[in-house]
Amino acid sequence: MLADKIKKIKVADYQSIPVVVNESVSVYDAIVTMFLEDVGTLFVIDNDSLLVGVLSRKDLLRASIGKQELRSIPVNIIMTRMPNITMCYKDDLLIEVAQRLIEKQIDAMPVVKKTEKGYEVVGRITKTNMTKAFVDLAKDDLI
Ligand code: ADP
């Protein structure tokens, strides 16, 4: 049954490679990274490679309006920060993560691994990954 099949799909089956920036990089450099890496969400890490924040396109646009010093403002001033980050684990069910994206009205979340010191970013899951899963299910001729 389709519902049973959906409930077996894990985040690990569809996650992408995360794009991360250090919390000390400038807003300007984060914008350049977002373009070069062709992603809509960047994850921000500290010097221990632990997750400290999230940057969306709108965060960067908002910071850009009317500000001249984009090269000197670090991203940790404008990012959404811990503990307010919605994240998931590679073993989570994809359908539950999809529900969380909708509830929180966000486009992406980091796939993390918990360590003693904090959370390491191991992947990225986005609405695009969800679309791909949806198409794969249709290809399986189950719909
Ligand atoms: P956009 O701003 O490009 O529409 P989002 O809808 O994903 O992208 O982001 C909306 C807001 O939610 C932004 O301020 C962003 O920092 C924040 N945000 C995005 N992803 C997450 C997340 N996984 N956890 C917490 N906040 C997030």
Image (spheres, rainbow, N blue to C red):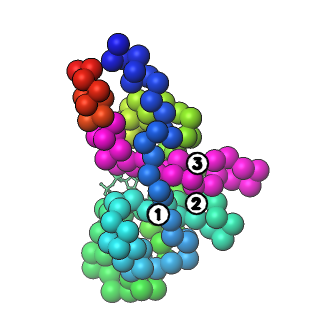
Residue range (magenta): 107-133
Pointer 2 with pointer 3, Cβ within 8 A: no
Residue 63, picture quadrant: bottom left
Question: In this view of the protein, can residue 124 be seen by the observer?
Answer: yes
The answer to whether residue 119 is above or below residue 57 is: above
- Element marked by disc 2: strand
Which amino acid, by three-letter code, is at mark 3?
Val
Q: Position of residue 53 (x, y in %)?
A: 52, 60
Of marks 2 and 1, which one's residue comes earlier in the chain?
A: 1
Of labels 2 and 1, the one closer to you: 1
Which amino acid, by three-letter code, is at mark 1?
Val
Residue 134, picture quadrant: top left
- Describe residue 135's horizontal placement relative to residue 78 as left or right: left
- Element marked by disc 1: loop
Q: Position of residue 11 (x, y in %)?
A: 48, 38
Question: In this view of the protein, can residue 102 be seen by the observer?
Answer: no
- In which quadrant will I find the N terminus? top left
- In which quadrant will I find the C terminus? top left
Residue hosting label 2: 52
The residue depicted at 42 percent of the width and 86 percent of the height is 71
Of marks 3 and 1, which one's residue comes earlier in the chain?
A: 1
Tally the numbered discs: 3
Residue hosting label 1: 19
Magenta segment: does it hold 119? yes
Residue hosting label 3: 112
